[in-house]
Image: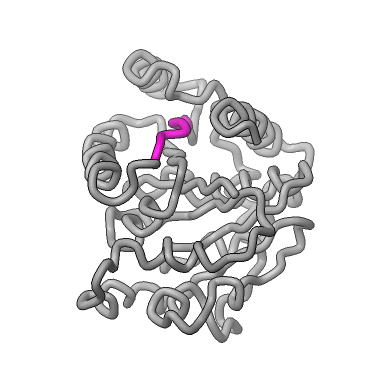
Amino acid sequence: MITIAVCNQKGGCGKTTTSVNLSSCLASKGYKILLVDMDPQSHASLGVGIDIYKIERSMYNVLINQEIKLEEIICKTEVAGLDIAPATLSLSGVEIDLVNTIGREGVFKGCVNTLPPKYDFMIIDCPPSLSLLTVNALTAAQELLIPLQMQYYPMEGMKQLFKTVDIVTKRLNSNLNILGILPTLYDGRTNLCKDVLSGIKGYFKEKVFETIINDTIKLAEAPSAGKPINIYDAKSKGTEDYFKLTDEVLGRVRQKYGA
């Protein structure tokens, strides 16, 4: 199983949109996918149609109670091959509950190690902060996918994210690699988007995906329907963009792992 953390501490950059739609597109290509919602806002869970108010156990219970296995909370989605480990608002209390836990940065990794080998990919939707939940995700992941909104401030925020990644790779997870930086919310009509895209490609070079996620209304509508974009509107530009990303992710993964 290849584990990909989708992470950016800046909110509104398309992180959850990417987690949900990449997971769904991979599943549509025949892969077995586990989407893990590590964000107390629970948007990834909502985005695949989970009623978070009817869930008895979630990622919160798995992280604070070693007796509850990750496999026990997994829910099916309407997308064949796509399961989710859902989150609820209670996940916001994890940092307080784990404050005295030895090795608290690796609690989630321990949960992953108990999972039967039934999935090809695990996609982790991280919260929009560099919190203990994010560090847990990065400690368990092999690859990091960074959605980046095509504006100035999000680009500046990358400095803090890379500082955190550097600490994690040195102290907690030497196997963590950057799979790629994904340009999101792109509007080709504006000079700002064009300039920011040119800037990140010039600086990060091959780390930037060739795929660009365009800012479209269908991508904004799909979460309210509780559906990934390829289920909500199979012919939309958003679906086209995320299938392009899926192919590019698979290409990069095959180069590294032969998967």
Q: Which is nearer the eye, 51 or 80?
A: 80
Residue in the image at 60% along x and 72% along y: 71
- In the image, is residue 240 above or below residue 84? above
Residue 130 versus residue 135: which sits nearer the camera? Answer: 135
- Which quadrant of the figure contains the C terminus? top right
- Secondary structure, magenta segment, majority class: strand
Front-most of residues 248 and 50: 248
Q: Is residue 182 magenta?
A: yes
Q: Is residue 219 above or below residue 244?
A: below
Q: Is residue 191 visible?
A: no
Compared with residue 139, is residue 158 higher up or lower down, i.e. above or below?
above
- Please tell me which residue is depicted at 37% across the width and 51% down the height of the picture: 138
Residue 238 x/y as whole percent: 65, 37
**Is residue 165 one of those drawn in magenta?**
no
Residue 98 horizontal/vertical position (percent): 28, 76
- Magenta stretch, residue numbers: 176-183
Give percent across and percent down for residue 43. Answer: 51, 62
Question: Residue placed at 54% from the left, 35% from the top?
Answer: 215
Q: Horizontal placement of 12 versus 251: left or right?
A: left
